[in-house]
Image: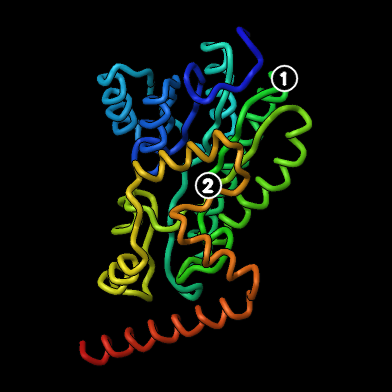
């Protein structure tokens, strides 16, 4: 090791899962722009390589690796190989995830298993493997992407919210322990970010019956999605300040505070939204 201090971000080594697109890609690009050596880990190998090539073309450091976050042995090997190659592991961004939306009634047990394996077990795999290395170093920062749905309710997000609440819980518990060894732990809780999952749930996600595409788009636009590049810049600034729970855009913090002050009121509000959506669906079915 050349030193035993976390770098933010020039000269740092960072691994970002799910970095071929969306929030992960934006984080990887911004990390590289700030001087980090970035590993773009994603199941979409070709897309990951194109992202890495675009970063290298700008004069920054990046390499792509095909990775299934459900495979702990593969995650562990990637992190060990990266630490051996660069002499350090400053950041582990557990960002890979999928979205499955729709009422609980339409979820199959396969839907549940799939989202839990990727969104929760994948984060556990990354956090566990990174912590082993960072404990030995006595420095490092584990950053996991949850969601505002990991802090409060979301329409038609029962399975997604279940996994994201788990990620928030993992972060809060691990942060208190890891601090004893100089390791930082944070969680990103974005509201709506303008990525491809807003339109079609992404490559591996799924929109179940219960809300039409038009209704979904109308609901999304009402909440002013944030540009992913802007999100990455603000998120990395907050990570550098070692913020434990990072909620962006800022206006979503109001909803988070409201949920902590009066959970019953927030549940009542969402119940009314569900009733409104049901009326819209019934009306569409009658017209069809």
Q: Residue furthest top?
A: 2
Q: Would residue 34 be visible to someone looking at this image?
A: yes
Q: Is residue 100 above or below residue 34?
A: below
Q: Choose mark 1 or mark 2, whichever is in front.
A: 2
The one nearer the camera, 221 or 281, is 221
The spot of residue 169 in percent (x, y) is: 67, 52
- The residue tagged 2 is 188
In which quadrant is the C terminus drawn? bottom left
**Disc assigned to residue 136:** 1
The spot of residue 65 in percent (x, y) is: 41, 25
Q: Would residue 114 be visible to someone looking at this image?
A: no
**Secondary structure beneath disc 1?**
helix
Residue positioned 55% across, 31% down in the render: 92
Q: Quadrant of residue 198?
A: bottom left
Residue positioned 50% across, 78% down in the render: 270
The one nearer the camera, 72 or 92, is 92
Q: Is residue 203 above or below residue 213?
A: above
The image shows a total of numbered marks equal to: 2
**Disc assigned to residue 60:** none
Q: Residue furthest bottom?
A: 286
Residue 237 lies left or right of residue 172; in this view the side is: left
């Amino acid at each position: 090791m050349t030193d035993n201090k976390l770098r933010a971000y020039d000269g740092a080594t960072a691994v970002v899962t799910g970095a071929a697109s969306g929030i992960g890609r934006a984080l990887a690009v911004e990390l590289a722009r700030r001087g980090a050596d970035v590993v773009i880990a994603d199941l979409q190998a070709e897309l990951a390589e194109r992202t890495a090539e675009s970063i290298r073309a700008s004069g920054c450091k990046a390499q792509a690796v095909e990775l299934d976050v459900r495979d702990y042995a593969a995650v562990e090997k990637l992190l060990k190989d990266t630490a051996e190659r660069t002499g350090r592991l400053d950041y582990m961004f557990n960002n890979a995830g999928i979205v499955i939306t729709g009422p609980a009634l339409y979820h199959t047990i396969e839907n549940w298993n799939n989202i839990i394996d990727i969104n929760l077990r994948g984060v556990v795999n990354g956090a566990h493997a990174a912590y082993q290395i960072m404990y030995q170093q006595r420095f490092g920062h584990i950053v996991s992407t949850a969601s505002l749905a990991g802090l409060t309710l979301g329409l038609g997000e029962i399975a997604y919210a279940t996994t994201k609440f788990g990620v928030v819980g993992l972060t809060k518990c691990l942060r208190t322990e890891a601090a004893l060894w100089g390791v930082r732990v944070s969680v990103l809780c974005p509201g709506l970010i303008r990525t491809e999952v807003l339109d079609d749930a992404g490559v591996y996600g799924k929109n179940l019956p219960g809300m039409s595409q038009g209704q979904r788009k109308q609901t999304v636009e009402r909440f002013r999605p944030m540009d992913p590049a802007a999100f990455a810049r603000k998120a990395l600034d907050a990570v550098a300040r070692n913020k434990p729970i990072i909620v962006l855009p800022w206006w979503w913090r109001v909803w988070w505070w409201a949920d902590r002050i009066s959970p019953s009121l927030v549940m009542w509000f969402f119940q009314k939204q569900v009733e409104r959506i049901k009326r819209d669906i019934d009306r569409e079915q009658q017209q069809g």
